[in-house]
């Protein structure tokens, strides 16, 4: 573009380069932003640093623009293109529409939606979209030179969302997305593309909706080393478990209510089987431990097998059951697991009820930081998307995963069998002499010591747990033990024939 190979005296070129570098430093601008906003070419600073010489009129124009910027700090509007106008997209358009003047006053830059895209142009979105340029194809919108920033709110780990985000990044255009599935699968590749083109990816809304956990991890914790991250990251599951804990209703009935209230999808499997939590955990784990994202390495167990019997025993023992995503270092590597968990009812995480989410960070500097709030919903999620947009408007640019992708460590999985913790084990035991002794001795043989043995005949009524003929409910609470020991012992117990059906095993955490 505006470069020539004419011989500019070296000191002039150096002075110009130094002026540009000083400008970047002073205004905390990325080279790409400088290129885009003041030079008209995102690559301008990179080319300049490599020794390419801009024409004298280009230098003059840019020097003038730097001078004017110093006296008049009004920035040109940030032109935004939004693909996806569903729950989050429509809320964002509305928020930007209503709050435009306020944002300009507070942040010194106008945020202007210029183009939008969805499947249906005629659908009522509850907000007027006629003023915006319409695109049928999200990739064409992402690649359009009319926008400075692409917002992806379509969803899905591949397909149009992936194609559009790639197109924007490859054009050096920053991206904001709320799409955890996309990031869990392609986060490292997308971050690499962003680095290569000097663009930025904001994904605050992808984990725990309205809770600013990504920014806290990436920037707020400074040099602190995270030893464990855990949290409630799915509002549907938390709603169901909270209702089951407060009222004597079954998982299936709670799920129906959650669907009627719009908290659960028509196909709830992704939420209640734990996969949604796993996607979010994979992203957090990478940010906490500076490893590659490894969603396929996560041990995942959902909440569909939780019964009123489990909830009732947990309550009697001073626990609540929560679906947690947990990532922590161990001597065998990094544990990433999603499963229903007994948590002490007085712990902070146990008090996060209903559809709320919470993420706890344990670091060497801060013993525990708990961030709690709305994990989903159009407004809360759009607010996080907007926070990323404002960062970009200010020229913020940090590596999406906290460190350059070349510095990410390979993920080293600690096998689930090496997990150590307490266990709740519920068995249906045949009502025959010697059964209890046989079971406890099998556990003892595998080095498992018991904190309590509870017989609860009262649990066997139709409302709580359908009775199985000639069996009694036995609950065992173990002291800290190895997962592999529990599995081996329970296989032996099953072989002995004193129990019927599969045992219920729930891990206990004592935060
Ligand atoms: N909803 C939440 O509370 C929440 C919370 C956190 C994160 N997120 C994430 O935010 C993203 C959006 O979620 P959402 O709940 O807003 O989804 P949604 O209500 O289903 O909206 C999806 C939007 O994408 C559009 N779309 C689908 N396929 C398209 C295509 N091929 N080309 C163009 N547009 C297409 C749809 O168009 P039509 O409207 O014309 O069908 C719709 O407007 C997802 O990644 C989700 O995981 C959502």
Image (cartoon, grey):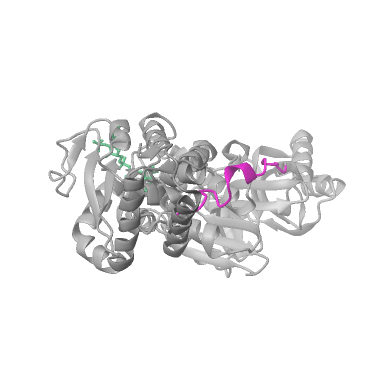
Relative image position of residue 200 (x, y in whole percent): 44, 47
Q: Position of residue 500 (x, y in %)?
A: 67, 37
Of the 4 image quadrants, the one containing the N terminus is top left
**Residue drawn at (70%, 41%), measured in percent from left and top?**
413
Could you tell me which residue is drawn at 66 percent across and 61 percent down? 225
Drawn side of residue 327 relative to residue 245, left or right: right
Q: How many marks?
A: 0
The quadrant where residue 110 appears: bottom left
Q: Is residue 461 above or below residue 348?
A: above
Q: Position of residue 34 (x, y in %)?
A: 39, 51
Residue in the foreground of this view, choosing between 235 and 369: 369
- For the residue pair 502 and 64, the one nearer the viewer reads as 64
User: Splitting the image into 4 quarters, where does residue 252 fall?
Assistant: top left
Left-right relation of 428 to 36: right
Image quarter for residue 118?
top left
Query: What span is in magenta?
Result: 397-414
Quarter of the displayed picture in which ligand 1 can be seen: top left
Q: Residue at x 32, y 54 (%)?
A: 382
Magenta stretch containing residue 119, yes or no? no
- Residue at the (40%, 37%) spot, across then down: 4
Q: Is residue 76 visible?
A: yes
- The residue closer to the viewer here, 247 or 124, is 124
Q: Nearer the viewer, residue 364 or 21?
A: 21
Judge left or right: residue 89 versus residue 299: left
SS majority, magenta: loop
């Amino acid at each position: 573009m505006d470069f020539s190979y004419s011989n500019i005296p070296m000191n002039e070129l150096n002075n110009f380069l130094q002026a540009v570098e000083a400008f970047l430093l002073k205004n905390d601008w990325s080279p790409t932003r400088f290129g885009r906003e003041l030079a008209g070419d995102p690559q301008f600073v990179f080319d300049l640093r490599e020794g390419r010489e801009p024409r004298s009129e280009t230098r003059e124009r840019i020097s003038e623009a730097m001078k004017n910027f110093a006296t008049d700090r009004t920035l040109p509007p940030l032109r935004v293109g939004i693909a996806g106008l569903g729950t989050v997209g429509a809320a964002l358009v509305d928020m930007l529409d209503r709050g435009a003047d306020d944002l300009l006053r507070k942040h010194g830059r106008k945020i202007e939606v210029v183009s939008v895209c969805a499947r249906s142009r005629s659908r009522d979105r509850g907000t007027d979209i006629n003023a915006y340029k319409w695109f049928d194809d999200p990739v064409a919108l992402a690649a359009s030179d009319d926008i400075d920033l692409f917002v992806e709110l379509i969803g899905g780990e591949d397909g149009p969302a992936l194609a559009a985000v790639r197109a924007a990044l490859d054009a050096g255009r920053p991206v904001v997305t709320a799409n955890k599935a996309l990031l869990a699968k392609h986060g490292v590749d997308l971050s690499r593309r962003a680095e290569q083109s000097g663009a930025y990816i904001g994904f605050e809304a992808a984990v725990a909706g309205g809770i600013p956990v990504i920014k806290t991890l990436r920037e707020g914790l400074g040099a602190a080393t995270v030893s464990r991250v855990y949290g409630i990251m799915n509002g549907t599951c938390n709603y169901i478990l909270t209702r089951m804990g407060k009222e004597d209703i079954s998982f299936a009935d709670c799920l129906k209510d959650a669907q009627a209230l719009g908290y659960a999808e028509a196909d709830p499997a992704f939420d209640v089987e734990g996969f949604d939590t796993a996607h979010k955990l994979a992203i957090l784990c990478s940010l906490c431990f500076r490893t590659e994202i490894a969603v396929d390495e996560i041990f995942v167990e959902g909440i569909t097998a939780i019964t009123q019997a489990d909830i009732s025993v947990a309550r009697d023992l001073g626990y609540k059951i929560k679906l947690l995503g947990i990532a922590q270092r161990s001597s065998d590597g990094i544990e990433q697991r999603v499963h229903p968990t007994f948590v002490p009812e007085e712990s902070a995480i146990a008090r996060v009820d209903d559809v709320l989410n919470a993420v706890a960070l344990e670091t060497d500097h801060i013993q525990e930081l708990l961030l709690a709030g709305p994990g989903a919903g159009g407004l809360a999620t759009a607010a996080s998307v907007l926070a990323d947009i404002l960062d970009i408007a200010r020229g913020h640019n940090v590596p999406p995963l906290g460190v350059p992708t070349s510095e990410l460590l390979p993920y080293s999985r600690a096998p689930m069998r090496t997990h150590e913790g307490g266990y709740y084990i519920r068995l249906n035991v045949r009502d025959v002499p010697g059964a209890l002794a046989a079971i406890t001795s099998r556990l003892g043989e595998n080095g498992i010591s018991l904190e309590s043995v509870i017989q609860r005949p009262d649990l066997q009524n139709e409302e709580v747990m359908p009775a199985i003929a000639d069996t009694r409910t036995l609950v065992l609470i173990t002291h800290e033990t190895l997962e592999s020991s529990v599995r081996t012992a329970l296989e032996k117990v099953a072989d002995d024939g004193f129990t019927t059906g599969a045992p219920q095993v729930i891990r206990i955490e004592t935060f």
